[in-house]
């Protein structure tokens, strides 16, 4: 996955709602552990491939209160769905102690570093008031590990409130990480105090923020929809979407449902070259 860096400045310039070089305040949703679950197999449960997951309970509350998405309704009360999520989490059970030590503040702080230079940036606890001229960014990220351990999927309910704006920009953004090697194991994500998990998740959260800041739907209204194929771990997925941009082996998509996604263009394509260039 390409690292958001100087590209953030371009993103800010392209978003009419956020002033160029506006200082940012990223507010951590809470001091709770970062949400990580096994990826449930929605295909076996009749769900559409590539559809947004029903988020974890904390995310459901955030999205329900912030955005009113219809797909939240009743999901956590569905016994079959609860059973499906419990089965998906089995592979993570040996690592619960490590996960308990990975907190939102650490994730948000690491993501802030990925956003590169700007007029000013800081992290703050939830509920902190904006300083003069600041753009407030709130999010409630939920991560999912594919059952083959070859990818993470982030679903981030995000709110961006530029200084002086009457109402926030609100969206759920999905990020699918680049595909890891075929022999990647769950333990690899948690070795060295979960160094790999921490690194990849911070990049993904930063990218979701970058996408939100850059989102200008009117500028892409005439982009045609097409069927996009992409890897989610070792599984091929399809999505009917507009391709907003492509960079470093990743595509940013707007789906028919209006959601935003960043997905690998092809397994490993362009990632090595971008890493060499420091992107």
Image: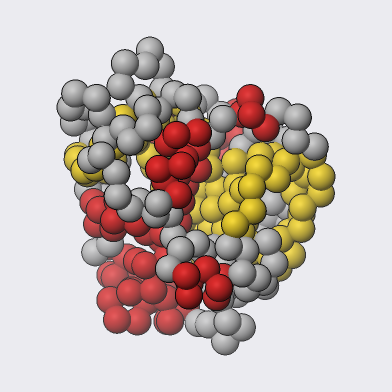
> In percent of the image, x 74 and y 42: which residue is there?
241
Residue drawn at point x = 59 percent, y = 41 percent: 260
**Residue extending furthest toward the bottom:** 183
**Is 183 rendered above or below residue 96?**
below
Q: Which of 132 and 107 is in front in this view?
A: 132
In the displayed structure, 133 sits above or below 227; it is: above
Q: Position of residue 44 (x, y in %)?
A: 74, 58
| Image quadrant in which you'd find residue 125 | top left
- At 78% from the left and 44% from the top, the residue drawn is 240
Q: Can residue 278 be seen in this view?
A: yes
Residue 204: give x, y in percent of width and height.
45, 56
Residue 33 at least partly seen: no
Residue 90 position within the rendered picture, expressed as x and y whole percent measured from the top left: 49, 70
- Above or below 129: residue 256: below
Report x, y in % for residue 215: 54, 34
Q: Coloring scheme of the render?
A: secondary structure
Q: Which residue is drawn at 37% across and 27% down?
A: 19
């Amino acid at each position: 996955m390409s690292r958001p860096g100087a590209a953030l400045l371009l993103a800010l310039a392209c978003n009419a709602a956020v002033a160029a070089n506006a200082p940012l305040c990223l507010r951590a949703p809470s001091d709770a552990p970062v949400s990580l679950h096994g990826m449930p197999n929605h295909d076996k449960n009749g769900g559409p491939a590539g559809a947004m997951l029903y988020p974890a309970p904390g995310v459901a509350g955030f999205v329900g209160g912030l955005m009113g998405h219809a797909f939240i309704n009743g999901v956590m009360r569905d016994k079959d769905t609860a059973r499906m999520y419990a089965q998906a989490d089995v592979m993570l059970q040996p690592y619960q102690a490590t996960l308990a030590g990975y907190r939102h503040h650490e994730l948000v702080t690491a993501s802030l570093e990925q956003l590169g230079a700007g007029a000013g940036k800081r992290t703050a606890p939830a509920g902190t008031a904006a300083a003069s001229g600041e753009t407030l960014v709130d999010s409630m990220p939920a991560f999912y590990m594919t059952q083959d351990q070859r990818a993470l999927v982030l679903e981030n309910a995000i709110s961006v409130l530029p200084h002086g704006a009457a109402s926030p920009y609100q969206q759920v953004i999905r990020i699918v990480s680049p595909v890891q090697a075929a022999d990647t194991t769950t333990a690899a994500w948690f070795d060295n105090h979960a160094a790999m998990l921490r690194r990849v998740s911070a990049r993904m959260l930063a990218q979701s923020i970058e996408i939100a800041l850059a989102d200008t739907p009117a500028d892409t209204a005439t982009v045609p929809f097409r069927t996009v194929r992409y890897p989610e771990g070792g599984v091929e997925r399809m999505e009917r979407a507009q391709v907003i941009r492509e960079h470093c082996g990743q595509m940013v998509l707007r789906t028919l449902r209006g959601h935003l996604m960043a997905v690998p263009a092809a397994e490993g394509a362009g990632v090595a070259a971008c890493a060499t260039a420091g992107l």
